[in-house]
Amino acid sequence: MVAFTFPGQGTQRAGMGRSWAEHPSWELVEEVSDAAGRDVAHLLLEADADELRATRNSQLATFSLSLVVLDAVERLGLAPEACAGHSLGEYTALVAGAALSLEDGVHLVVERGEAMQVAAEEHPGTMAAVMGLDDDAVDASCRRADGEAWVANYNAPEQVVVAGATAAVSTAGSVAKELGARKVMPLQVGGAFHTPLMHPARDRLRKALAEASFRPPEVPVTANVDARPHPSPDEWPSLLSAQLCSPVRWRQTLAQLVESGVDQVVELGPGGVLTGLARRAEPSLQALAVATPDDLDGLLETLAGGGHATDGRLPQGERLHLSERLVLSPATGVFAPAPAGDAAGTEGEVVGVGDLIGNVTSGPAGVVEVRSAFTGWLMGIMVMPGERVTTGQPVAWLQTTGAA
């Protein structure tokens, strides 16, 4: 079983969208910009580190790029059996799991980012990662600080994040070192997230949540607040509201995914922080990250075989192995297979590089040819004649001729 995970605020970096700008999935950026009423392309391509550090910008940028990566992976014909997201990433997971529409997801992320930024300005704070100390000891460090300091993230064994007022977090860090912490590392964030200092943001977010339409997730989505999947759409508004001031139980979330049968997690979005946490928290999991288009081939090959337990799944339920390749549509339109009798249109026949698989009738662009980039036996056409396909959608799969 494969789970998709999505990163949260703090994973953003300047220019993180540049590698995706020429990918077909980049078209999603315009759609997100329209829904947000903001220039998301600017955030992903031109904004510097200082601009991206602002909560209202970092959350929208990270959410948007994660959606671009998700779209690119879906175009390969891969789908998860579970989803989860870290903090902000929970909203991406809900969109990925079809519990939220893209438009509602964008609106909620915009409102959340604005509300959290205002709350952080009213109640300044910070966060720090404590390494080498167990959960209870870190919690005790916060209590002994005798101030506004709390556990904000349970990320992995002996990797816990504390947050709160700057002086209290500093004191908690000192106590943690006295108790044996290996390292206390300040985080470059805009506030004390997932603590009571975010309480002023809840009213604005609750209003936005009340206006959003939640649906039953098509795949289980595990919540940060209690590390449990919630199939009822009625529960998600209160869960997302509570998440603002409650710790992210990420280590527990990973444990829940393993218990449910997940053995591979794929992180979709900037950075690769969640991949490292998964490897540390649950050694039985195979974890990999997709942050750039170059990672897509590695994803296919890893999920397809190579001695791993889980196979990548094609839309028709077939299994794509390392000896097999996908032929993707070069355009959006109506698909027609190659003429009957043509080797490239006959299952079991050998298809060569450049052979015609079919055509896509694509409006003003006219008829666009679908040609194979590989040599191999045609194992199946994956779409019906007359079916509408999108750019990058798999339309056929081949077994390479070098396969045993």
Image (tube, rainbow, N blue to C red):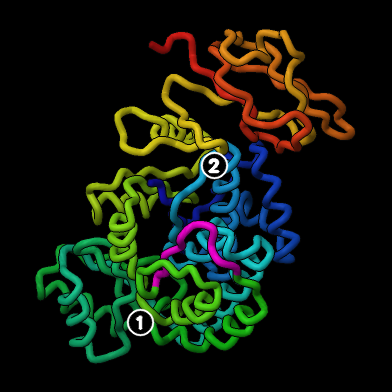
Position of 33 compared to 165: left or right? right
| Mark 1: amino acid | Gly
Pointer 1 or 2: first along the chain: 2
Residue at 68% over, 52% down: 29
- Helix, strand or loop at label 2? It is helix
In the picture, residue 214 is in which quadrant? bottom right
Give, as a single range, the part of the protein colored magenta. Answer: 215-224
**Relative side of 236 to 188, left or right:** right
Vertical side of 175 occupied by 227: above or below: above
Mark 2, residue position: 73
Residue under label 1: 164
Q: At 34% across and 50% down in the image, what residue appears?
A: 262
Is 60 in front, or is 67? 67
Foreground: disc 1 or disc 2: 2
- Of the numbered discs in the image, which one, if any, rests on residue 135? none
**Pointer 1 with pointer 2, Cβ within 8 A:** no
**On the image, which quarter does residue 133 sit in?**
bottom left
Q: Nearer the viewer, residue 36 or 12?
A: 36
**Residues packed near mark 2 inside 10 Å, few (<14), some (14 to 19) or many (20 plus):** many
Q: Is-magenta flag for residue 221? A: yes
Q: Does 102 appear above or below 290? A: below
Q: Position of residue 115 (x, y in %)?
A: 57, 80
x, y percent for residue 189: 43, 69
Q: Image point 49% across, 51% down: which residue?
A: 269
| Alpha-carbon span between mark 1 and mark 2 | 37 Å
> Percent position (x, y) of residue 167?
30, 84
